[in-house]
Amino acid sequence: MKSRSLTRQVVGIVFVAQVLCALLLATTAIFDEAHTHLRAFDVRLQGRSDSLLGAIQDAKDANSSVEVDPDELRLPKEDVFAVYNFGGSMLGSSARAPSELTVRGANGFRSVRFRGVRYRVLQREALRIIDRSKFGRAGLQRPVTIVYASPQRHVWHEIFEPLKLALISIFVAAALTMGSVSFFLRRALRPLSDLETAAGNISPPLLNFDPPASVLKIRELRPLADVLSEAVRGLREAFENEQRFVGNAAHELKTAIAVVRSSLQVLMLKRRTPDEYAAGLERAFQDNLRVEALVAQMLLLARVEDGSVGDVVPLDLSAAVRNVLAQLRPIAEEQQIVLKCDCPPGMMVRISPERADVLISNLVLNAIQHSQRGAQVEIGITRNHNREIALAVNDSGSGIGSEALPHIFERFYREDRSRSRNTGGTGLGLAICKSIADGAGGSIKVTSAPGEGTKATVVFGAVEPHRQLLPL
Amino acid sequence: MRILVVEDEIRLAENIASGLREGPGYAVDVAGNGEDAVHQCETAEYDLIVLDLMIPKLSGEEVVRHLRIRRKSTPILVLTAMSGAGKTIDLLNAGADDYMTKPFDLGELIARSRALIRRSRGTAEPILRFGDLVVHTTEQTVRQGDDKVDLSPTEYRILEYLMYRPRVIVSKRELLEHLYDFTWEHHSNVIEVHVSNLRKKLRTGSEWEIVKTLRGRGYRLANQTSER
């Protein structure tokens, strides 16, 4: 995916904002200036037409032509004017007055274009006094219309000239702002590259992440650093757990192999009698069986821990328990242990039959191994008020110490290794049980009182009634 | 020589003990966890400790540190399933003397045990000499001058122990403790018989005896020059 530069984006936004701001300012200024200047221009135009009127006020008769020398009046050279009598005929005009400069519409100001040049035109009425000597002091008053025009380009020049300077300063300021914004932004984002370095250093086996102080100081970045720390810690724990498992597995396997090897080497240390050889070989064979059991358990654990659930089918748990108990009875009888089963029919759970067998036989075997001769192991299946099905295996054996209880589901954990060796335990049985129970969407719990016995309970989620009706 | 084997895997402990008993003829005690190991080291004098690293209660590493803090200089041979150099370095730095990775060779374990004991007794050579006596510790043979001396295993072990500490008085108790496992007290009467037999077999041709009994104090190897 294409990545965008935050710095560029921010600088761009700042630039656009400044330009818009400048344009808005300039437009307002132009409107304001134009208004003021045009009004002043109109006042000036009025004044000039007044001067013109003064020059043409006295006349011999009503229709005598107007002759004015603009130099004498000090009117600007580019100004043009024309004077008309009431009848509409021209009494006179300035030298370069265009023919379009006529009386038109109402009196007042208007803007007109003559020969491609914009003019401001003032059309006004005035009185002309005819021949004071003949008609007395007041004279004969005759109305005339003055049309006076002056090009507007000076006004626009006056408006834009100061604005040009302001616009240049605004653009210089914008450039400076962009530069400094970019600089400060890069500086503000530097903790991100510190974070990048720290995150880049996360690697096994240490899996260590120390958020840089520069990152922690920034409120916006702190949550990110915290989330990263948390994630790395979780990873580290999982990694350490796996490493511990691999270490333990290596230790168990190597020890088991060391036992076989040393058993054979003890036998070979010196010449022995045939009976001694036979006994030694038998022991070595037993040691080898333990290696096999350990490897089988490790492979089984790997299989149930790989996240798969096996071939899940609706399974009659009671039937499965009875099946397993039939297989374990000879072992129990050898130790004079009675297996008591309270398993009502129709207890359906969803689990792979193979895994259910492993789960049940592991729990029952544990109970047998920790029971005294002549004791009783009770296996019960019940349905609780949530329609969940619970399998409980109860023994009255030695129990589990309170400090060992939290660890019993850990892989390779054994409360008393010297005893578990005698019973053939590998320390993986309960870890396998837990993994199977979790995989089947259930849970497993062990309660125990030392000297009184242990109760292992597996709770399975209920199977919906319509599924229960499915044939096995 | 008396050895403590610290190993929680009973079968392995049994095999190591058998190997050390049947091979060099050491007395062997077994401890199944770290706490027992420390306790046993406090109550008895061992000539070597064979220590598994992954044991319950106290780890092997903790046992090593514990013993070294208590200024016990007993050589320690560590058994480990790990083969990482870092771990090994840590162990040796903590005070272990040697290590072997599982699965190990029992013959090698016996040879290393012998070497560690020899070193701790201040000799590098597997042959011990005293006067005209020569004891070959690996072959477990004894020669006096040009003659081969035929000793029973117990007599040999008594002589070997005394040869490591020539001219020093070794008490009967010390001798018992180092030659037998925790059952040593049952053997206290027979040791005198063994010493007497040993003395008879080491003929000097004169009134003077190589294995001298100092009544109430113990035994000592002595030759004519040192007697004077």
Image (cartoon, coloured by chain):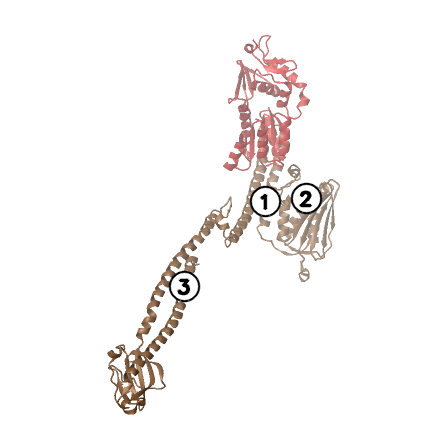
Residue A27 found in image quarter: bottom left
Distance of mark 3 from mark 1, alpha carbons? 69 Å
Q: Please provide percent x and percent y for residue B78.
A: 56, 32
Chain coloured brown here = A
Distance of mark 2 from mark 3, alpha carbons? 79 Å
Q: Please provide percent x and percent y for residue A343.
A: 73, 52
Mark 2 sits on what residue? A366
Q: Which secondary structure, mark 3?
A: helix
Q: Amino acid at mark 1?
A: Met
Badge 3 crowding class, 10 Å Cα cut-off, few under 14, some 14 to 19, many 20 or more, is: some
Chain coloured red here = B
Q: Is residue A303 left or right of A60 when viewed as pictured?
A: right
Whichever of callouts 3 and 1 sits on the residue coming sooner in the sequence is 3
Q: Are marks 3 and 1 in contact (CB under 8 Å)?
A: no
Mark 3 sits on what residue? A18
Q: Amino acid at mark 3?
A: Gln
Badge 1 crowding class, 10 Å Cα cut-off, few under 14, some 14 to 19, many 20 or more, is: some
Q: Please provide percent x and percent y for residue A304.
A: 60, 50
Q: Quadrant of the N terminus of chain A?
A: bottom left
Mark 1 sits on what residue? A298
Q: Are marks 2 and 3 in contact (CB under 8 Å)?
A: no
Q: Which secondary structure, mark 2?
A: helix
Q: Are marks 2 and 3 on the same chain?
A: yes
